[in-house]
Image: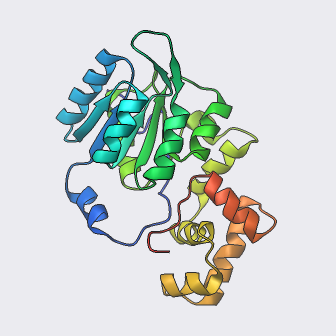
């Protein structure tokens, strides 16, 4: 088996959500997982692997329509999604990014992990823009890497492929900038993504407004936006979600 962190650059996580029963359950019980993979043999092998590792498979499907219908009925904690989904008759191919978009719209709490052989930076960027929490290369991922990635995104972490964490230019590089933010800065960024002003952020985090201003100034310096609106937009493009209850 390879190094569990091989193939992606784990961050320290997105802004911490308020403690909830779901977050407590994830830290003490099995993670509920849904699989969308068109190749039956690989889908069944992954299900067996993850079950053996202590994860709970609540849904396994080979086509987006079945997957989305069933996920509405029984939402998982993490959805593992392939990007190229060929129908059984081979006549149609569905882009998995459309599934990410549906999940972001209808189930924003589900953490999506893309498992694909596609290494195109623009495709990977689209996945993050549409709400993916992580991206794992199918051809180089080993069992330990997959299990570690699922557990990481379930904890609220964001996973960027190592090859992209050092890419020069592009918004994908901006995604990796999350790795350089402190935990408090990521919390503040989450509230900014939700449209909160400094006073509201200070109230939610129980810190002074002056401290919030200091964190916001640091975010401008590290992420490079020109104004607060750009900062909020950039946060959302990087997949940062506003805290629950905002």
Residue 235 vs 201, above or below: the answer is above
Eyeballing the image, is 229 above or below 61?
A: below
In terms of depth relative to the viewer, which is nearer, 12 or 73? Answer: 73
Q: Position of residue 108 (x, y in %)?
A: 46, 54
- Residue most toward the right? 226
User: On the image, which quarter does residue 53 sit in?
Assistant: top left
- Name the spot of residue 202 as percent of width and height, x first: 56, 85
**Is residue 151 visible in this depiction of the protein?**
yes
Residue at 69%, 71% (x, y): give it: 218
Identify the residue shown where x is 61% and y is 48%.
176
Q: Residue at x 29, y 46 (%)?
A: 73
Q: Quadrant of residue 88?
A: top left
Tell me how the rendering is colored: rainbow
Q: Is residue 85 above or below residue 162?
A: above
Percent x, y of residue 8: 49, 38
98 with respect to 70 (left or right): right
Q: Quadrant of the N terminus?
A: top left
Q: Position of residue 216 (x, y in %)?
A: 67, 74
Q: Is residue 8 visible?
A: no
Q: Nearer the viewer, residue 205 or 77?
A: 77
Query: Is 124 displayed left or right of 80 in the figure?
Result: right
- For residue 39, side relative to residue 160 (left or right): left
- What residue is at 71 percent from the left and 45 percent from the top? 171
Q: Is residue 163 left or right of residue 51?
A: right
Compare residues 61 and 18 and report the one nearer the observer: 61
Count of numbered tags? 0
């Amino acid at each position: 088996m390879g190094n569990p962190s091989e193939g992606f650059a784990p961050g320290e996580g997105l802004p911490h959500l308020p403690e909830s029963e779901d977050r407590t359950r994830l830290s003490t019980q099995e993670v509920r997982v849904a699989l969308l993979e068109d190749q039956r043999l690989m889908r069944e092998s992954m299900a067996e692997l993850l079950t053996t590792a202590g994860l709970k498979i609540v849904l396994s499907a080979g086509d987006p329509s079945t997957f989305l219908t069933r996920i509405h009925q029984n939402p998982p904690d993490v959805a593992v999604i392939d990007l190229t989904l060929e129908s059984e008759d081979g006549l149609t191919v569905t882009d998995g990014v459309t599934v990410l978009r549906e999940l972001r719209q209808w189930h924003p709490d589900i953490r999506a992990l893309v498992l694909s052989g596609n290494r195109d930076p623009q495709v990977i960027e689209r996945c993050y823009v549409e709400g993916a929490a992580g991206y794992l290369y199918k051809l180089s991922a080993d069992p330990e890497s997959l299990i570690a990635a699922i557990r990481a995104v379930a904890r609220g972490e964001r996973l960027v492929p190592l090859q992209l964490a050092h890419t020069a230019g592009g918004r994908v590089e901006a995604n990796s900038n999350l790795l350089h933010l402190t935990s408090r800065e990521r919390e503040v960024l989450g509230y900014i993504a939700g449209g909160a002003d400094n006073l509201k952020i200070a109230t939610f985090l129980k810190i002074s407004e002056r401290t919030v201003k200091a964190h916001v100034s640091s975010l401008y310096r590290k992420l490079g936006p020109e104004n607060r609106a750009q900062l909020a937009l950039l946060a959302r493009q990087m997949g940062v979600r506003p805290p629950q209850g905002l």
